[in-house]
Each structure stands twice: as structure tokens, then as C-alpha cells.
Image (cartoon, rainbow, N blue to C red):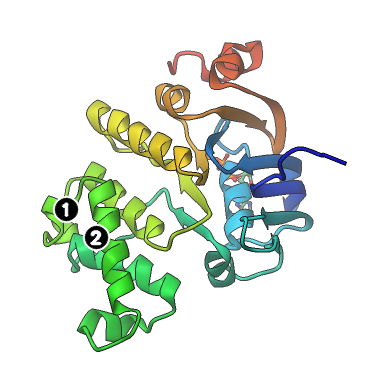
Amino acid sequence: MSGGPRFRGVRIRGLRRRFGGVTAVDDVDLDVPAGAVTALIGPNGAGKTTLFHCVTGLDAADAGTVTLAPQPDRPAVLLSGLPPHARARAGVAWTFQRIELFAGLTVAENIRVGAENRSGRPLLSGLLGLPDPRRAAVRAVTGAVLERLGLTALADVSAGSLPTGTMRLVELGRALAAEPTALLLDEPASGLDDHQIVRLAEVLRALAADGLAILLVEHDIRFVTAVADRAYLMVAGRVLLSGTPDEVFASDLAREIYIGES
Ligand SMILES: Nc1ncnc2c1ncn2[C@@H]1O[C@H](COP(=O)(O)OP(=O)(O)OP(=O)(O)O)[C@@H](O)[C@H]1O
């Protein structure tokens, strides 16, 4: 039996989440493969953020499964039922719509927090610079992430003093420093100018090319078209269409939803 290459990435099956009478996520199947950027699009209230939170563990699904599987050297992990920190440990990293940086720390220190979280090293001892065998590894990862995102020159700048677009990059850096298998981004292009959007798209394309599984929830049509390999259109809790961004945005349904927005 050949069966082809095994799926790697996040696999969502039969996901459902109800809030009282509202079914925010209604029996959704969705694959977020390694090596690609997957976009989840749809109108306000479609259920995108709820789905996102059911993958991170910040919300609990009523039914269905979320699996992270399989890295060559690691067995598949059933994420459903695990708390967020355990999902992070398993290899999922995410950023939120609202920027949540440590404003009083420098860019490098913020990114280091991500690396410390992953290595399991106590945060405080890390920030105080106490001896730790994992310290060199944390420093190396921090340096590599700064470099990758073009933030090296800003390493010692206070994060709170940065413009929004740069803060979003630092947040991305903090997520990447955990060396995730899957990266989930909730509206990463919001608040960015055109130049920053192009740059972010380039960075995400490069990360996907390196094998990361990327899922983004996004409203910006140009950004989705530039960055995503596949788009899923969600309406009223259900995925109604999927395909390349061009295919999905060209559909009658998407044109109806996004009319006047492009
Ligand atoms: N904690 C909650 N309690 C009750 N209803 C909720 C809760 N969270 C979301 N909902 C409802 O679930 C539905 C989906 O909301 P959700 O925020 O997931 O949509 P969305 O696609 O992310 O929208 P947006 O693009 O505006 O962020 C909406 O009807 C919303 O009112």
C-alpha cells in the first residue's frame, strides 16, 4: 500500500461550537497543511474567531476533533481537550487580533519570552539572566528570529514605542521563537500599511516554504490573495467554499459578501 505522503499539519474534523441558540461553528472540516498558508475568510460573525479559539484551546468545542500531525520525529497529538499551554507545548503558536506585547520590554526580550516558554525555562530567571543550560539555545533562537523578521537593528528598542506594523512583527517573532509546527494568526494585516502588508506576506510565504503550517483569519482581500495557497469561506458557522483565493473571491457568494470591500 502506498497511500502517498502522510498529512502533516493541523486537521480539524466535525468541529462544532454553540453559544445558546447560536451555532458559531457548525460541523467544520478544515486542513491546515505544513508548507502552506491557509486563510479563513468570511463576514463578521461567521465563526472564524470561535474556530481559531477552538484550535488554540482558548475556547472548548462541543464536538469534533483537532489534531496536530505528524512531524517526522513526533507522533500525532490530539489537541482537543488540552488547555492552551499544552497545545503550545505540542507545537501550536498564535497571535491575536489585539496586540499583546510586553510594552516595557525590548523587542529582543519579547521574542525571548516565546523561546523561554518553549524551552520550559522559568520566565523570571530568564529575564534576570540567571545561569541556565538552555540559555544559549534561547539566545540562538532569539537571534535567528530577529534576523528572519528583519528586527535585529531594533533588538534593544522598547516594544511599546514601536509603530503598529512593527509591533505585529514582534508578536509574530514571539510566536515563532517557540519553534512551532503550526502558526495561527488572527487578522495579522490589521493596522498595517501597504508596505508592511507586502513585507508580512513575504515573511509568511518564506516560513511556509520552510515547512510551517500557517492558518490566518483575515479580512484583507489583497493580503489573502498574495499570501494564501488556499482559502476557506465561512458563513454562519459553516465552510461553504474552499479553493485558491482567486477562485473563492471570484465566486458569486464571495462577491456578494465582499462587495465594495475590494
Ligand atoms: N462568547 C460568546 N458568547 C456568545 N456568543 C458568541 C460568543 N463568541 C462568539 N459568539 C457568537 O458566535 C458567532 C460567531 O462569532 P465569531 O466572533 O467567531 O465570528 P467571526 O467570524 O470571528 O467575526 P469577526 O470577523 O467579526 O471577528 C456570532 O454570532 C457571535 O455573536
Question: Between residues 254 and 250, which one lies in front from this camera angle?
Answer: 250
Residue carrying label 1: 152
Quadrant of the image containing the C terminus = top left
Q: Are marks 2 and 1 in contact (CB under 8 Å)?
A: yes
Looking at the image, is 249 positioned above or below residue 73? Answer: above
* Residue type beneath disc 2: Gly
Query: Would you say residue 23 is visible in this rendering?
Result: no
Q: Relative to 4, does residue 159 appear above or below in the rendering?
A: below
Where is residue 202 drawn, in percent x and y? 34, 32
Which one is earlier in the sequence, the residue at label 2 or at label 1?
A: 2
Q: Residue at x 77, y 47 (%)?
A: 13
Give the amino acid at mark 1: Thr
Q: Secondary structure at mark 1?
A: helix
Q: Please determine whether, in this image, residue 134 is positioned above or below residue 64.
A: below
Numbered disc 2: secondary structure: helix
Q: Is mark 1 within 8 Å of ligand 1?
A: no
Q: Report the side of 95 relative to 143 (left or right).
A: right
Q: In the rendered image, which residue does mark 2 sit on?
A: 143
